[in-house]
Amino acid sequence: MPPLNVGNQQPRTPLNADEAWRTTAGRAARTVLFFDFDGTLAPVDDDPTAVQPAPKVLAAIESLAPLVRRIAIVSARPVEFLREHLGGLDGVDLYGLYGLEHSHSGGETVTEPAALPWVPTMSELADLARAELPAGTLVEFKRLSVALHWRTAPQLGDAVQEWGRTQADRLGLRVQAGRMVLELKPPVDRDKGMVIGEVIRDAGGAWYFGDDVSDIKAFAALRARAAADPDFFGVCVAVANPETGQEVADAADLTIDSPAALGDFLTEATHHLT
């Protein structure tokens, strides 16, 4: 494994992945493992409804869950989608729509109250997008957000983004750019960085695995925690991709080649933690 710099403490002797897991083993009961879903646990697909976790990923997470304090999936997907696609994993917390929804260890889904009044606006926006955007644009309505995809028609990217940003300005929405997608969200203060920052307040360590620009806020939350507490051990892991991969890798401590490679990486990690 290539060397990596861990946490936000400088200077720090470079560690490789095996050494990082061995360090984690000494504090596993106080460590949280966070994962994005699309592009991290599952490869990105032209049809966002058709994605499935990569081989070995779910089995590895199931093996890791009893070895660490918590495992959490933090995604732009709704909680219900995550629940269906993770095969009923036991003891895993789900944070959907960048934290606007959450479910702890298989419990009920809780929605951020401030976001609920925006559901009708999002529904109307999805209808408008389907009516006005050119053929080839995929409009994904998520109840509390609308994602505009142009993966199957890359030439539409500029037009879709211009339309989306214009609508966001008109309606007072927030915009999240991603891998050939633009997502419009309510103006509610919830993002991946905030979720991670809250969960790790009293943790002894955390790993975050992500592939897209929204995951950089999660990396920043780990680094902020490490800066505030020299005993905290944080590792930021990027899963490579051809669209936003370099920007995310530049913000990470370690890069993994693909969701499939992540399955192997996590399987190996269980040997260090047992």
Image: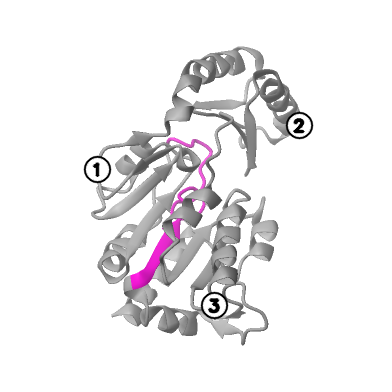
- Mark 2 is on which residue type? Asp
- Mark 2 highlights which residue? 158
- Mark 1 is on which residue type? Gly
Residue 37 drawn in magenta: yes
Question: In the depicted view, which residue is nearer to us: 262 or 75?
Answer: 75
Q: Secondary structure at mark 1?
A: loop
Q: Are marks 1 and 2 in contact (CB under 8 Å)?
A: no
Which span is picked out in magenta?
A: 30-49
- Mark 3 highlights which residue? 230
- Mark 3 is on which residue type? Pro
Residue 274 location, quadrant: bottom left
Q: Is residue 100 visible?
A: yes
Question: In the depicted view, which residue is nearer to us: 263 or 78?
Answer: 78
- The Cα atoms of the two marked residues, 2 and 3, are separated by 44 Å
Q: Secondary structure at mark 3?
A: loop
- Mark 1 highlights which residue? 107
Residue 197 drawn in magenta: no
Q: Is residue 254 visible?
A: no
Q: Counting residues from the N terminus, which is met first, the one under dot 1 or under dot 2?
A: 1
Residue at screen point 33% across, 51% down: 93
- Residue 94: percent from the left, percent from the top? 36, 47
- Residue 236: percent from the left, percent from the top? 55, 66
- The Cα atoms of the two marked residues, 1 and 3, are separated by 34 Å
Question: In what quadrant of the picture does the N terminus appear?
Answer: bottom right
- Crowding near pointer 3: few (<14 within 10 Å), some, many (20+)? few
